[in-house]
Image: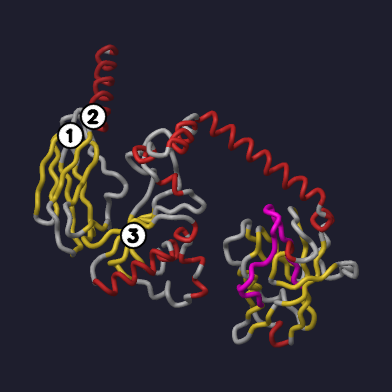
């Protein structure tokens, strides 16, 4: 009896495993809410068991196909006009139903940080834009940050289509959002934005393996990086250098080490002065890799001191840690994001207020970018922070 039950148990496991392996699967980008390109044949693809028959119905058209021996399959629908929402049903050993599909114009939004920059990072420039962004015909698919030097990937680890609305729009690429919004207003067709941007990425990273053969130097480099151990050794070495540099910096930085240079009672008679904005390499400091502390005092009326405020510090090269009246209010670790720090009630006071910034530069030409705003902003007024600041290495 025990032997029979054991055989039955293994038979059930085998049948269950066989059933799981035969499940039809779709790539992440073919999913609920997707936007398909109008006016051109539409390809739908996925995976199943080898030689499995698949039937796909979409927009009153049905297509049938059989997966190849490896389980891959693909069908092609005729070109269609803009419209939606539609549903798609994939029928095989299992049934998949996709909802809320649109047909319109689909755009690849690729590039570096200018394309990657999300709407939430520019929300103060467009205070009503996110709140009023509801548009079910404008959608983004965000491609996650991941890479593989060995071969092209057949699918992504995650991803889904999201329509523009106050909840989702903050994560849209700002450039692609305004681009897509303008296109929708002009053409009145659904717009799909595939956000596949990565700050700092070189154009060589986006070239196909076949096209890279035309550039042997880059091709050889790509082949070299197929070695996982090599990549790990480079990452480990870079991490060790960075950690060592910052550890030594913190050890030698008197203001950081003693935790005093951001405090109001500090004697600054021996500090130098320079005008902000500007690069310290263009002043008496020259090219400095490391940290420089800046301090500025401003006077506030009782009325302003009892308000919340926003400290606007343009852009700083490279990293900053910022304090107001000795209280830490924020930091950014690299040069590109604009600095905007909310100052809550109770931090400001009537009379003299101290703003302190520890700037860390790893490029030598550190400082405060010109032609940006440097101010303390209140509800109905602002105080310029440009001009003379005290500084010390």
What residue range appears in magenta? 354-375
Q: Residue at x 73, y 70 (%)?
A: 324
State the image quarter where residue 302 is shown: bottom right
Up the image or down, 228 lies above or below 178; here it is: above
Q: How many marks?
A: 3
Where residue 392 sits: x, y (%)?
82, 63
Where residue 147 sits: x, y (%)?
44, 41
The answer to whether marks 1 and 2 mark residues whose Cβ atoms lie closer than 8 Å is yes
Give the left or right position of residue 104, taking residue 355 as reference. left
Q: Mark 3 or mark 1, which has the lower sequence index?
A: 1
Residue, disc 3: 193
In the image, residue 216 lies in the stretch drawn in magenta: no
CA–CA distance in space, label 1 to label 2: 8 Å
Quarter occupied by the C terminus? bottom right
- The residue mark sitting in front, 2 or 3, is 3
Numbered mark located on residue 67 in the image: 1
Of helix, strand and loop, which one carries label 1?
Answer: loop
Quarter occupied by the N terminus? top left
Q: Residue at x 86, y 67 (%)?
A: 271
Residue, disc 2: 70
Q: Say which of 248 and 307 sits in front.
A: 248
CA–CA distance in space, label 2 to label 3: 31 Å
In the image, residue 367 lies in the stretch drawn in magenta: yes
Q: Mark 2 or mark 3, which has the lower sequence index?
A: 2
Numbered mark located on residue 327 in the image: none
């Amino acid at each position: 009896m025990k032997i029979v039950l054991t055989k039955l148990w293994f038979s059930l496991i085998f049948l269950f495993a066989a059933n799981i392996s035969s499940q039809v699967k779709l790539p992440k980008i073919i999913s609920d809410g997707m936007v398909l390109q109008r006016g051109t044949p539409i390809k739908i693809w996925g995976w199943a068991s080898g030689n499995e028959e698949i039937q796909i119905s979409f927009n009153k058209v049905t297509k049938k196909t059989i997966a190849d021996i490896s389980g891959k399959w693909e069908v092609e629908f005729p070109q269609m006009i803009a419209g939606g929402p539609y549903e798609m049903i994939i029928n095989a050993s299992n049934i998949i139903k996709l909802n809320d599909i649109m047909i319109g114009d689909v755009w690849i939004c690729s590039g570096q940080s200018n394309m990657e920059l999300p709407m939430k990072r520019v929300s103060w420039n467009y205070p009503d834009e996110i709140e009023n962004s509801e548009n079910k015909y404008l959608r983004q698919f965000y491609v996650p940050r991941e890479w593989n030097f060995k071969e092209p990937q057949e699918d992504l680890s995650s991803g889904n289509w999201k329509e523009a609305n106050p909840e989702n729009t903050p994560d849209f690429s700002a450039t692609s959002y305004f681009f897509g919004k303008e296109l929708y207003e002009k053409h009145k067709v659904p717009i799909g934005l595939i956000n596949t941007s990565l700050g700092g990425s070189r154009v060589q990273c986006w070239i196909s393996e076949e096209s890279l053969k035309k550039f042997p130097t880059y091709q050889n480099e790509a082949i070299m990086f197929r070695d996982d151990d090599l990549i790990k050794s480079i990452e480990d070495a870079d991490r060790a250098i960075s950690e060592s540099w910052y550890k030594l910096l913190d050890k030698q930085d008197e203001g950081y080490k003693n935790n005093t240079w951001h405090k109001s009672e500090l004697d600054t008679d021996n500090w130098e002065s320079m005008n902000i904005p500007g690069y310290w390499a263009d002043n008496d400091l020259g090219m400095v890799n490391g940290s420089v502390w800046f301090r500025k005092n401003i006077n506030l009326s009782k009325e302003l001191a009892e308000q919340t405020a926003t400290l606007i510090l343009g852009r700083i090269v490279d990293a900053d840690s910022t304090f107001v009246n000795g209280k830490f209010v924020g930091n950014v670790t690299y040069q590109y994001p604009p600095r905007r720090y909310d100052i809550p009630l109770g931090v400001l006071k009537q009379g003299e207020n101290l703003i302190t910034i520890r700037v860390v530069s790893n490029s030598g030409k550190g400082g405060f970018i010109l032609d940006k705003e440097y101010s303390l902003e209140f509800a109905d007024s602002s105080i310029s922070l440009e001009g003379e600041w005290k500084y010390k290495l």
